[in-house]
Amino acid sequence: MVPGLGGVNSRSADGGETVATNTPAELAARLKELARSGLGAAAVGIAPASRPLRYEAFEAALQRGDQAGMAWLARPEARAARADPSLLLPGARSLICCAFRYHAPPPHVSRGQVARYARGADYHEVLPQLLEPLRLAVEASGGAARVLVDSAPLLEVAHAARAGLGWIGKHSLLLHRDHGSYLLLAEILTTLELPADQPVADHCGRCTACLEACPTGALSQPYRVEAARCLSYLTIEQRGHLPAPSREWFDHWLFGCDLCQEACPWTRRASALGHPALAPRADLAVIDPLELLGSADEVLRQRLAGTPLWRARRRGLRRTACLLLAQQPGPAADAALAAAATDPDEVVAAAAQWALAARARHAKAESGAADGNSGLHEV
């Protein structure tokens, strides 16, 4: 008997115990209640394990090259699985989609900001543990189950929208009326055939606040994200050299970016509190680029291992810290960049050298402006 499900026990063909229910709808209701009340999911719903909503839009994005350097998105086997989730689990019929709210304190602008989802333990490790009782419940009910948390090619936002967890916002994230978009998604793919929930209506209307908030133009139109212009992509997934124009875009964000979410009226009105297992660490809200560049490699690794931040690795974090210092006044930034300019990693060294050159250009421009202004007062 699986705690939290109730019902009458029966025996499976191999003699194992299963959870008996009168109807698939009753089983679905109990599984969803376990996810909400037992596991703390902010929202849960069921979608069919079939071609997801807006799959054609995903293919169109690949054709345009919106994925930038994320070549794995376009691999044939990955595209096939995104079109047909049953390829991820033979005989799959249903997806139990769960959304977990993470903590979202009010905006505070500081150089070295970290996206809110990344300020605590790595959700790739946390969410599978949270879903383990639900997986066991599914298996005890006679179905095979596979837990998915960014661990397989799945259009999770589209499936979550199909499952009625919310709607897809114009920034391409899932939006919930009560929780906004500060949600992490996880799924259980199962061979159980469960009744699907109904999608909810789109409540964005004519609002374009998220599109207007993007500082780089990555959200050039509703429901489209150009990764090559997105600060989240550039700080997390793009770990090599950055193209010259994009280096000018870095002023505050060290890892990720929340600006499109901060601008959303639905997200602004949501609670700042999230799931306890996703609680943020005070030392990860902002990481001073000077401190980061001054930290020994092992110290940095120990501090950030086990958090989403470590996905960027040493190279990505130190490179972005250098770019942030291009606009930070004071001799301390000059000294840190001079040291980083001889870093053994060529990507870090190149970023530091570019930042030093940018600082020199800015200083020269400011000096020229000051001279010109002083001349206006001469008689």
Image: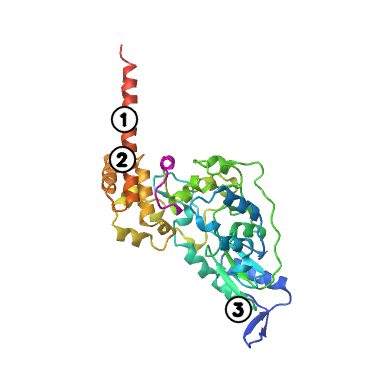
Q: Is residue 81 magenta?
A: no
State whether residue 177 appears in this view.
no
Q: Front-most of 269 and 89?
A: 89
Observer-side mark, 1 or 3, equals 1
Give amino acid for label 1.
Lys
Q: At x 32% / y 45%, what residue is drawn?
A: 352
Q: Could you say where residue 119 lies in the image, as x and y percent from the top left?
A: 44, 56
Q: Give the left or right position of residue 185, taking residue 52 as reference.
A: left
Q: Give the left or right position of residue 111, taking residue 293 as reference.
A: right
For disc 3, the marked residue is: 2
Magenta highlight range: 237-250
Q: Front-most of 90 and 141?
A: 90
For disc 1, the marked residue is: 364
Q: Is residue 243 magenta?
A: yes
For disc 2, the marked residue is: 356
Give amino acid for label 3.
Val
Dominant secondary-structure state across the stretch colored magenta: loop
Q: CA distance from mark 2 to mark 3?
A: 61 Å
Way the structure is coloured: rainbow
Give the mark, 2 or 3, whose residue is nearer the N terminus.
3
Callout 2 crowding tier (Cα within 10 Å): few <14, some 14–19, many ≥20: many
